[in-house]
Image (cartoon, helix red, strand yellow):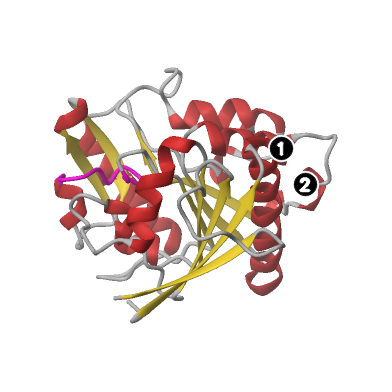
Amino acid sequence: MPSKLHVTYVVEPDQDALAWRAALHLVELAEEAFAARGRVRIAISGGNTPKRTLALLADPAHSFVNRMPWHALELFFVDERPVPPEDAESNYRMAREALLDHVNLSPEQIHRMEGELDPEIAAAHYEFDLRRSFRLEGAELPHFDIVTLGMGDDAHTASLFPHTAGIHEMGRLVYANHVPQKDTWRITLTWPVINHAREVFFLIAGEDKAEPLKEVFLGPKDVERLPSQLIWPASGILTVILDKAAAAALPPPDADGTGHLERAR
């Protein structure tokens, strides 16, 4: 983990503009990955903001659908709820309805977390899938090209919730995290896997995120209470795309809507 984290935050006026900026950022990163390595491996998160972004990527009214190198893409998931794929709470269902039903991806290109299984078994299956797909040996970590994240009003990210065991897991790639405050389980990539990605960015919207976001980036280190502080990419660079409401407690951005922060470890 680098000693300093450089955070660039981009502030958009509303959630529609945020989704547009996120779609553009995702396509640009995918184009760069394809040009450099001939393939694009993306891990996506669930939620309403990512749903809008994914829908834009598939919309034939916009250029994103033609720019994305679909034939070279492998789509993975950051986390999943313990529900079957057709359940309304399923992150996979969200992605399917917003994106996958509308673009040309083969089943082999889509790596679903099996939320219908026992969480421990689902986590083990997904870890096996990652090891096979990335041809990992021993303690190697997968090297995603892009990981997209959200943040909850409790400062959780992925399914790393405050005061849960997943915060401390460093040996596994995928973890079945018990979340007692929600009386449920979640299947999640672990934070070392997320931080090993070439590009990591947050999509955060809503006024209820403003104070937690300020604490994550400007407050003292407290990962037990603020798990989003665990996100510290190996590159030392983190991008955060926000709407105006979520950015309200951060220092005002420059005239171009971009701000910069730096955190020391």
Residue 157 magenta-drawn?
Answer: yes
Image quadrant where residue 136 sits: bottom left
Please report contact status of discs 2 and 1: CB closer than 8 Å, yes or no.
yes
Q: Which residue is mark 2?
A: 64
> Residue sitting at 70 percent across and 44 percent down?
20
Q: Which mark is residue 139?
A: none
Range of residues picked out in magenta: 155-164
Front-most of residues 85 and 91: 91
Residue 56: percent from left, percent from top:
71, 37
Along the horizontal axis of the image, is 232 left or right of 178? right
Using the numbered discs, state the Cα–Cα distance from disc 2 to disc 1 in whole angstroms.
Answer: 7 Å
Residue 123 magenta-drawn?
Answer: no
Along the horizontal axis of the image, is 80 left or right of 77? left
Question: Could one spot residue 78 in this view of the protein?
Answer: no
Q: Which residue is mark 1?
A: 56
Image quadrant where residue 252 sits: bottom right
Dot 2: few (<14), some (14–19), or many (≥20) neighbours within 10 Å? some
Along the horizontal axis of the image, is 119 left or right of 200? left
